[in-house]
Image (cartoon, helix red, strand yellow):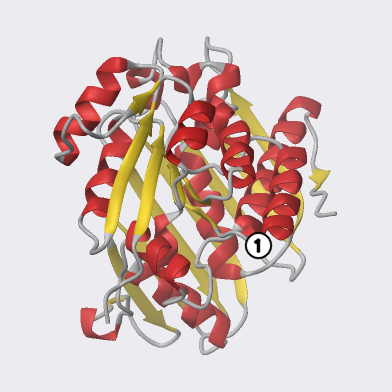
Amino acid sequence: MSKQELNFAFIGCGGNARGHGRSVSSVDNVEIVALADPSEGSLNAFKETVGLDDSVPTYADHVEMLSAAKPDAVVISSPHGLHFEHIMDALDAGCHVHTEKPMVCTVDHAKQVMAKVEETGLHLMIGYQRHLSSTYQYCRNVVQSGELGRVNFVAAQQSQNWYRNQQGKWRQDPFLGGGGQLNDSGSHLIDILLWVLEVSPDTVFAMIDNLDIEVDVLTAMSIKFNTGALCNISIVGHAYGGVQETFSIWMEEGSLYLQDGKLYRQEKSGRPELVDESKLPASANKDAAFIELIRGERTENPIDVANGLRVIQLTEAAWQSAELGRPVKVDLS
């Protein structure tokens, strides 16, 4: 039986979108039928990278594209501060939506998106690809099964050369970026922490340094969860080299350590040992997963709107804590 034919459109055609484009175009019976971006250079580069010919129409305005092309689904890879408008317009046009992270940049917008998804019955998936990573799936399975006991403490750290590399670009613009490094790459770390633990943050205390720009660059954050577990998160946007990330979970009967893509497990009476790849769940591609969701081949959305809401709830609380200079309760209402 042939797969359901799907027409895709793209809102935002920069470098990140081109990776999505290659993934989407490689799936059987999926066609990219339209592109929207105010930059003609980005549109041309997308076509060249993905292998599209000049018959694919391009638009400077996404609303015009949605009306003319009438796609089944839209991939949104625009600046963070534009996500809310692009998501709502795409849902209003009857399109399933795969949006890059963060879903939106305020709790109010997240709640509006959640209501719109419920109203339309359409799928919205967020590009937090760690949900589909074998190592993070393993961590979640161990934590949720309770095989190593309850979680006592978590430490997560991410560093990259964000401060220098993004100077003069949209990611350091307060509106287009919707915040700084905490809301950019740091968003991945907050999301995967909440997903692996499946707990609610109760209190957060954050210290933030913007250095000499308008948005956050360095964040030191401590969290207490409703289970009593504690957590430290370090977001270092002023470092040399590429992205480095560590994730450690200490439980009653053992620990998990994830560093540079390698996962180690330590039982209470032994040393940390590399987890054999044969014991890890299968990884998946997020674009393929989105297509499977639309076609009904996946019964559960791996990264839905609820994930986007809880990320921005914790992020907003961290910004508020840093501004007030004291711990604050995380509003989960």
Identify the residue at image location x=42%, y=36%: 77
77 displayed left or right of 201: left
What residue does disc 1 label?
121
Q: Which one is nearer the viewer's eye here, 124 or 94?
A: 94
Identify the image quadrant of residue 109.
Answer: top right
Location of residue 61 in the rendering, given as x and y in whole percent from the top left corner:
48, 22
Q: Is residue 140 above or below residue 110?
A: below
Q: Residues within 10 Å of mark 1 (few under 14, many from 20)?
A: few
Q: Is residue 68 above or below residue 117?
A: above
Q: Is residue 290 visible?
A: yes
Q: Which one is nearer the viewer's eye here, 85 or 169?
A: 85
Q: Is residue 181 above or below residue 307?
A: above
Location of residue 121 in the rendering, given as x and y in whole percent from the top left corner:
65, 62
Location of residue 304 in the rendering, given as x and y in whole percent from the top left corner:
58, 60
Locate the N terminus and report the quarter of the image it occupies: bottom left
| Three-letter code for the amino acid on which mark 1 is drawn | Gly
Location of residue 259 in the rendering, given as x and y in whole percent from the top left corner:
32, 58
208 displayed left or right of 204: left
Locate the C terminus and report the quarter of the image it occupies: bottom right
Identify the residue at image location x=22%, y=47%: 22
